């Protein structure tokens, strides 16, 4: 009985957060573009990578642009080791404009492609139009008959956050309420230490990876 | 006085209101784009059209194409550029644009299937214009704002990447038992131009443990200047003036790991000595991933002793003493090669990393720190010259979408000349090298630090801090990394496999290594190896281990195989092992 209970508990511990994460957490997808035969590119989409992250949301509202760096890699399946055959990078920049109360977004893909999406009233609307809609990237395989797959790496970070910016933000956001007596000083210190540790550990950058199914060129 | 204040306030409010009135549409089209679009439309001689335009597959436009209030359906060829104002553009697979494609107030469909020889720029924001005969001019009220002269991202990028300066406050190294937290404080000036880049950092190095102590007043400096001539490859020229504390064995643990271990657990895995002087360097770089430099330094090496910085835990325990190191004036000539083809610096899946350095050292007026057994105290010579090499060689391989097999070989040592100064010697024990073996533990013969325990000698023959003192060392590391599939609802063959920071990977690893002294072997002394030979492979110490790597932090356990009685070691690494 105890074993069954323990197993049930373990299932709940593992399964519930996982199912919750699937419904509300960030989502990054890369799919093989089927329109060409053999496939010559991938379709990329992301959802909730900004809106589901409280920290990034706060930083955006504080005026720090968010930078999303996408890297799409074409991997060739090898006999022993898989090899990267080619890759492409592009960036999405999202900024909150406090005056117009709009989220502004722009996509830069190398030096030859630039797309200004204009403004959106909410972060969710910006994400829906800019990221959830599939973005097609041409990355054709070179070796006919070989097996390939696409690997997508996405790094999300609040830009312009130097240590000095962080210190000022901490003084404004975390420490000031404590100085004014609105929050316990120890709590402010703990949050500050947490922020510092998070930065040391690289927690300020969100890193996602996704890969497509394997296909034959 | 009050009326004057009111008048001033009124005037300021009116000015602010005026400014706001001008700034009507912050999300409008940038003014430079509006100007460019109208200029191009008015200039276009080849084909200018209003309303829907369709270019068939067999048709060619010899020049530019400008369309107002389209859409544009392009199957044929345009030898010039295409401008679409308040129009969508649909490109068929047969479409070919030899020049640029500029779309204002519209979208582009099919750009991957078609050929566009030039730049593609798409602006969702419509152009508000007025007609003046055949020409159009931008409507000033909606698009012309001072702050909207150019795209916001261009302004942002300009401030970020081009020329600038800022006051820089950041850690100058790991938290450590000699200086506490070293902090760089000072200006940073940088310039990026078409010719390359220039950067000057001029920092005072404030040490929390000694800079504010009235008896020491210990503030260092670190002034660095570097020019890179060329964008994708070119020449590096640089120079540096410094008064810093330099750690030894930096190839083992990262700065964050060493600092956190010291700050949290009062364990400092590095040793420190002081360097004061200057250095110039020149070299070549190819893209961002490879460079080769030659540098020459004239500096003074000094010893530093431990302080007692604050730690979060184990405050009742003492610090491991910082060893004394050799002192003197040094002239160093270094040749350094760095090759980095990894696809990602933080979480590499594939690629090479090679760091190779050869150092020729010339020391004057040397005073030597004491050595642990079996090395004997050195008094002479006052002047030395030596050559030392160091190589860190890594290969990252993806063996399947879910798994990696990575290798690392680190080797280094004395090449010729006088014996190496103590700070240039090696150790291969501890969590950064052979984690199955404890850090700096006494043993009868320790081939990881090249020390021996002598029961009859003071302190068992060890000098305080037990610095590594191997002439040469070799370490091989191999690890297999396989994805964990924590998420029970994901099909492992799912087309949309995804993972993030919090998902983990299994890591199985094996390490083998040892250090040795160069000399003619006497009897059964396992530490001495002839100059031209390598130690027998059977004398290398090995460990096996397993861990869970959650990208930012990894939890591991390692078991020594060469000494089965040694207990398994549990350890934590920040980021990956290598």
Image: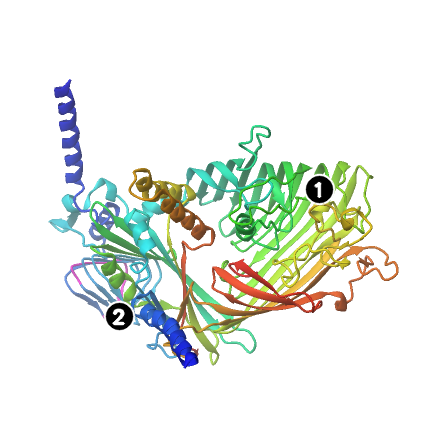
Query: In the picture, residue A107 is in which quadrant?
Result: bottom left
Bin the neighbour count of mark 1 within 10 Å (Cα to Cα): few under 14, some 14-19, many 20 and up. Answer: many
* B330 in relation to B492, above or below: above
- Residue with the most extreme front position: A1
Which of these two is toward me, A121 or B327? B327
Residue located 29% across and 68% down the image: B110
- Label 1 belongs to which residue? B325
* Residue B96 in sight here: yes
Estimate the x, y position of residue A189 in percent, counting from the top left.
40, 45
| Boundaries of the magenta span | B56-70
The N terminus of chain A lies in which quarter of the figure?
A: bottom left
- Chain to which the residue tagged by mark 2 belongs: B
Q: Nearer the viewer, mark 1 or mark 2?
A: 1
* B491 in relation to B222, above or below: below
Which of these two is toward me, A167 or A115? A167
Type of secondary structure dominating the magenta stretch: loop
- Label 2 belongs to which residue? B75
Residue located 29% across and 66% down the image: A24
Q: Is residue B226 magenta?
A: no
What is the CA distance from the residue labelled 1 to the residue labelled 2?
75 Å
């Amino acid at each position: 009985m105890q074993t069954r209970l323990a197993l049930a508990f373990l299932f709940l511990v593992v399964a519930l957060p996982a199912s919750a994460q699937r419904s509300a957490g960030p989502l990054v997808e890369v799919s093989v573009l089927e329109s060409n035969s053999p496939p010559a590119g991938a379709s990329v989409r992301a959802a909730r990578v900004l809106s589901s992250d409280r920290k990034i949301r706060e930083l955006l509202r504080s005026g720090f642009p968010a930078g999303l760096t996408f890297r799409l890699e074409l991997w060739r399946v090898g006999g022993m080791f898989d090899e990267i055959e080619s890759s492409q990078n592009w960036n999405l920049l999202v900024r909150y404009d406090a005056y117009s109360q709009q989220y502004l977004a722009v996509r830069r893909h190398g030096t030859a492609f630039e797309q200004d999406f204009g403004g959106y009233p909410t972060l969710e609307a910006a994400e829906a139009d800019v990221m959830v809609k599939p973005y097609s990237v041409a990355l054709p395989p070179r070796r006919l008959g070989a097996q390939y797959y696409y690997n997508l790496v996405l790094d999300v970070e609040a830009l312009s956050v130097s240590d000095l910016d962080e210190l000022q933000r901490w003084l404004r956001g975390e420490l000031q309420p404590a100085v004014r007596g609105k929050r316990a000083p120890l709590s402010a210190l703990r949050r500050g230490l947490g922020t510092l540790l998070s930065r040391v550990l690289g927690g300020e950058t969100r890193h996602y990876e996704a890969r497509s199914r394997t296909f034959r060129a | 006085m009050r009326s004057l204040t009111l008048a001033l306030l009124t005037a300021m409010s009116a000015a602010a209101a005026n400014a706001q009135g001008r700034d009507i549409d912050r999300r409008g089209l940038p003014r430079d784009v509006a100007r460019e679009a109208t200029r191009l439309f008015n200039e276009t001689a080849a084909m200018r059209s209003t309303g829907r335009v369709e270019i068939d597959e067999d048709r060619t436009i010899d020049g530019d194409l400008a369309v107002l209030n389209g859409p544009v359906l392009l199957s044929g060829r345009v030898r010039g550029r295409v401008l679409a104002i308040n129009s969508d553009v649909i490109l068929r697979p047969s479409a070919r644009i030899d020049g640029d494609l500029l779309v204002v107030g519209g979208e582009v469909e099919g750009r991957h299937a078609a050929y566009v020889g030039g730049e593609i720029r798409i602006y969702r924001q419509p152009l508000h214009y007025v007609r003046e005969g055949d020409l159009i001019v931008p409507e000033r009220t909606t698009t012309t704002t001072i702050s909207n002269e150019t795209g916001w991202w261009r302004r942002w990028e300009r401030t970020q990447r081009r020329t600038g300066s800022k006051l820089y406050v950041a850690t100058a190294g790991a938290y450590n038992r000699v200086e506490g937290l070293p902090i760089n404080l000072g200006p940073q000036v940088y310039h990026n131009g078409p010719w390359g880049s220039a950067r000057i950092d001029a920092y005072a190095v404030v040490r929390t443990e000694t800079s504010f102590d009235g008896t020491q007043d210990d503030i260092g400096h670190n002034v660095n200047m570097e020019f890179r001539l060329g964008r994708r490859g070119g020449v590096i020229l640089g120079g540096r003036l410094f008064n810093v504390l330099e750690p030894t064995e930096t190839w083992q643990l990262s700065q964050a790991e060493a600092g956190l271990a010291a700050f949290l657990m009062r364990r400092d895995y590095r040793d420190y000595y002081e360097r004061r002087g200057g250095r110039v360097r020149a070299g070549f770089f190819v893209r961002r991933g490879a460079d080769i430099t030659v540098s020459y330094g004239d500096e003074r090496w000094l010893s530093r002793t431990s302080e007692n910085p604050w730690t979060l835990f184990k405050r009742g325990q003492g610090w491991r003493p910082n060893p004394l190191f050799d002192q003197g004036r040094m002239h160093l000539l270094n040749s350094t090669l760095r090759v980095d083809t990894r696809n990602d610096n933080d979480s590499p899946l594939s690629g090479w990393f090679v760091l190779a350095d050869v150092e020729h050292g010339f020391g004057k007026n040397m005073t030597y720190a004491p050595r642990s057994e079996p090395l004997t105290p050195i008094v002479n010579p006052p002047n030395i010259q030596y050559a030392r090499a160091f190589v860190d060689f890594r290969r990252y391989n993806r063996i399947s979408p879910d798994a990696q097999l990575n290798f690392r070989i680190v080797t280094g040592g004395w090449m010729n000349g006088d014996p190496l100064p103590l700070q240039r010697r090696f150790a291969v024990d501890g969590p950064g090298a052979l984690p199955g073996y404890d850090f700096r533990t006494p043993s009868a013969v320790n081939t990881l630090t090249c020390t021996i325990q002598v029961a009859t000698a003071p302190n068992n023959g060890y000098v305080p801090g037990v610095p590594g003192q191997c002439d040469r060392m070799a370490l091989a590391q191999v690890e297999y990394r396989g994805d964990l599939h924590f998420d029970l609802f994901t099909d492992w063959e799912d087309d949309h496999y995804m993972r993030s920071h919090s998902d983990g990977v299994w890591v199985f690893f094996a390490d083998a290594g040892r250090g040795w002294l160069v000399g003619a072997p006497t009897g059964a002394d396992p530490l001495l190896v002839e100059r031209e030979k390598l130690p027998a492979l059977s004398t290398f110490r090995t460990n096996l281990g397993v861990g869970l790597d959650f990208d930012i932090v990894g939890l591991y356990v390692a078991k020594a195989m060469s000494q089965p009685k040694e207990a398994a070691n549990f350890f934590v690494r920040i980021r990956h092992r290598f």
